Image: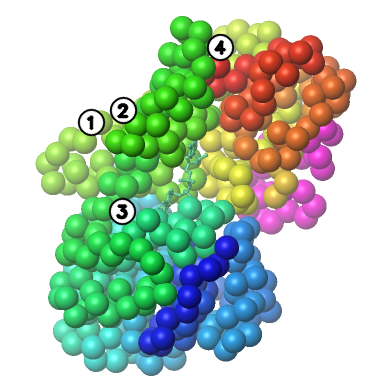
Amino acid sequence: MNDSSPTTTTTRIAVIGTGYVGLTTGVCLAHLGHEVVCCDLDERKVEQLRAGVVPIVEAGLPELMAEVVEAGRLSFSLGSDPAVRTADIVFLCVQTPQDEDGSADLSYVKAAANEIGPMLEPGAIVVNKSTVPVGSAQVVAHALGRDDVHVASNPEFLREGTAVHDFLHPDRVVIGAETADVAARIAALYDGIDTKIVSTDTASAEVIKYAANGFLAMKLSFINSVAAICEQVGADVLAVADGVGSDERIGSKFLRPGPGWGGSCFPKDSRAVIQIANEYGYDFSLMRYVIQTNEEQFERMVHKVIRGARRSPEQSLDGVVVAALGLTFKAGTDDLRDSPSLRIANELARRGARVKAYDPTATGELSAVQSERLAAFDLCSSPIKAIEGADVAVVLTEWPEFAALDLEEIRTALRGNAVVDCRNLFDPEKVRAAGLNYQGVGRS
Ligand code: UGA
């Protein structure tokens, strides 16, 4: 999968923050031939990384990390000193959580910039990779307190679960810089990758990041609405998505209907873009409807389960047992942040159902975060154990192992006979042929 070739010019790089963006960026830049130090303030995490343990589920990352550490091009540091003192380029990859009003909280970005300011070599470049509001390059420049260094923007478009692949095979690399020389120095980091470089000013680069996530969220809300129509008119949304997506102007990607979109990025960024627009006096009403449509999608999924349990939305789900298959916001990650699957399962529990849940990333010993977020469920060690004695089995996350489940076994294990497939993993005909009552998304 990592067939991009290492570069010839080596740059010394410090990466601040080892979340999935920072760690993937550091590992992949080291893979491209650069000398990288990944810095974090979390002592436990740095120790783990030094021991070769990748603390997140991310395909290909542990292998590539081991390779570049072994080659001597990647190391880990507690804090940014001394890595930043010798770095040609510093990437800021710290978190930008959401403030109460929906705007991005820049306190981590500012704190990191404050800290590294005095350490930077003259001429060094500080690159914002965190998702930051328009104008953040100036905020960082101010926090650095230096006029002999540069600030640029190089937004990331990595999807969790396929971040390594996305880094090494991007559709484009966006670089926002105020001079051609700075842009060229950043572009040179990606020399080993065959892709289009979109070179622009910092504000445009910052807008590109929000516009890309906003557009993708809009596409998903759109197809989920089309799915709702399909259910009413007796059409199949998968055929519709294929027919619509075959038009190259529209494109077939991101047209998979589901339980609603979530994760650590779309919900936060779609609210932030509305907030940014508000600040500049523009009401981004389209984005408000995109979010509202997504809220309605969660509710529609909950109603499908209620129907499967032969109750009405006004009734409590007391006495109903639901098997929740999948809890992470999508397959291929252990991330529970803003997970539609978790939200739907929690809503069913709140309405009185006993929720027996299974997720491949939540078996065995749980992390503190998992224990807290999954407290409302009876966690099971296999999908079939979750289904045993349930009235409704609901597929919430598209883990491939669910598609491989034996339908006869599901029917025997269930107490009721309803399957709600929020990810359209199953073939409806086959499920019905097994004597089960099937509801998918957009498949009448
Ligand atoms: C998203 C973007 O895809 C990345 O380009 C971006 O870099 C990242 O946010 C970010 O800003 O950091 P990610 O949050 O990892 O990446 O997840 P996606 O794969 O985009 O999925 C987001 C949500 O949409 C999930 O809930 C997923 O289940 C849902 N989805 C996605 C669908 O329901 N249908 C689809 O066809 C695709």
Q: Secondary structure at mark 1?
A: helix
**Which of the two marks, 3 or 1, is nearer to us in this view?**
3
* Residue 227 screen position, x and y as percent: 46, 20
Q: How many marks?
A: 4
Mark 4 vs 1, N-terminal side: 1
Q: Is residue 63 left or right of residue 278?
A: right
Mark 2 vs 3, N-terminal side: 3
**Which of the two marks, 2 or 4, is nearer to us in this view?**
4
Q: Is residue 16 left or right of residue 335?
A: left
Query: Spatial distance from mark 2 to mark 4, Cα to Cα?
Result: 25 Å
Residue shown at the point (70%, 20%) measured from the top left: 419
- Name which residue type carries label 1: Ser
Q: Which corner quadrant of the image does residue 395 belong to?
A: top right
User: Can you identify the residue that label 2 sits on?
Assistant: 289
Query: Spatial distance from mark 3 to mark 1, Cα to Cα?
Result: 19 Å
User: Can you identify the residue that label 4 sits on?
Assistant: 444
Q: Secondary structure at mark 3?
A: helix
The answer to whether mark 2 and mark 4 are in CB contact below 8 A is: no
